[in-house]
Image (cartoon, rainbow, N blue to C red):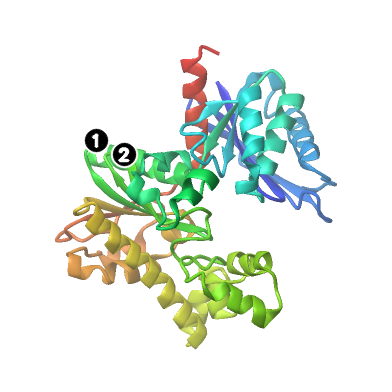
Amino acid sequence: MLIMSINAGSSSLKYCLFDMDDDKLISKGVFERIGIDDSFYTIKYNGEKIKESRELNNINDAVKVLLDRLITLNIVRDLNEINAVGHRIVQGLDVFKNSCIVNDEVIEKLNSIKDFAPLHNPKSLETILAFKELLPSATNVCVFDTSFHQSMDEVAYSYPIPLKWRDEYSIRKYGAHGTSHRYIAMETEKILDKKEYKLISCHLGSGASICAIKDGKCVDTSMGFTPMAGVMMGTRCGDIDASFIPYIMEKEGKNCFEIINDLNTKSGLLGMSCLSSDMRDINQACDEGDSKSLLAREKYVQRIVDYIAQYYVLLEGCDIIVFTAGVGENNPNIRKMVIDKLNCLGIKIDNQKNDNLREFGKISSKNSKALVYVIPTDEEKMIALDTVNLINQNNL
């Protein structure tokens, strides 16, 4: 069974094509600068990589080129071989509690909530419609970043605001990165070989979130109504005191949407370091003694530690802490700085294992009270698994 996983961004389209019968990744790629000058695409298959410039005026153009290249590169012989397309959807509110097969009702509901993720959901909907038109033989499936967090109880997802705002305007915590955290929970269950466990999952990339998971279900997560909340990120501020927003509006002569944009795109590591949103650049600057970068990195680490400690108490202990995503998987220095601050909880790292780790493995020391692992996330695989399960459940 051939399944395509799709991740549509505001100006990009990422894909992975899986042969789920053989558990094999056949091809993957990305179409970038869609709707912008100098658009191009990259496709990887059979150990080869091609990169070509191509005018991509919209999502429809990108999907057309993708499907055409799958044929002309002999990645598939016939487009009808592709059984289904799974789409990553950033925001499902509490309207979508699980992944689902796309039908007219789903499209209508997606359209009704698109304003809750204006940079992503409209593009995802546009992508679904493009695949329905250009690949009509395939089943389309939606996999929501927010659905894994629907298991949070009312205390966790409610904000201390007038209840009317939650009930009438849907203002509550929804979280994000749920597909990644769910994948980490699935892999943790395999490692521990049991279904009862307490996990703190740390998805640390350009975007970052921490998730408290008990027995495979989300108990709480750091991101909130939008992905801006929680820990400090590459360009996002994380948790702030919102009351300074009107003050800055007056000082800067900006409206609230411009300030929110600054908090989303010009804050975090980039804002504090005045250098970069990339932790590799920050680490290099720290090695050179740059004071702003040192401050930014320390703040980044402290915010992560704050959430891990909070969730350690919430879960009444912890069996395992997992680092994943770009920074979590590839930056031993950040992992060490985080775990060293958790020594008071009896959580300790083996420095040699941490420094020498490549891709996957245990990095906690023998006397650590909780396991610490690095597990590469695979959101695309999770999307494909959900898609296969829904097809099988519905005998499609």
Amino acid type at mark 1:
Lys
Mark 2 nearby-residue class (10 Å; few <14, some 14–19, many ≥20): many
Discs 1, 2 touching: Cβ within 8 Å = yes
Identified at 21% across, 50% down, the residue is 319
Residue lying farthest to the left in this orientation: 367
Identified at 56% across, 44% down, the residue is 90
- Left or right: 194, with 142 as reference point: left
**Residue 122 rendering spot, x and y as whole percentages:** 69, 42
Q: Nearer the viewer, residue 131 or 365?
A: 131
**Quadrant of res 82:** top right
Residue bearing the label numbered 2: 216
Residue 53 in view? yes
Please, what secondary structure does the residue beneath circle 2 have?
Answer: loop
Residue bearing the label numbered 1: 195
**Residue 225 rendering spot, x and y as whole percentages:** 50, 53
**Residue 121 rendering spot, x and y as whole percentages:** 64, 43
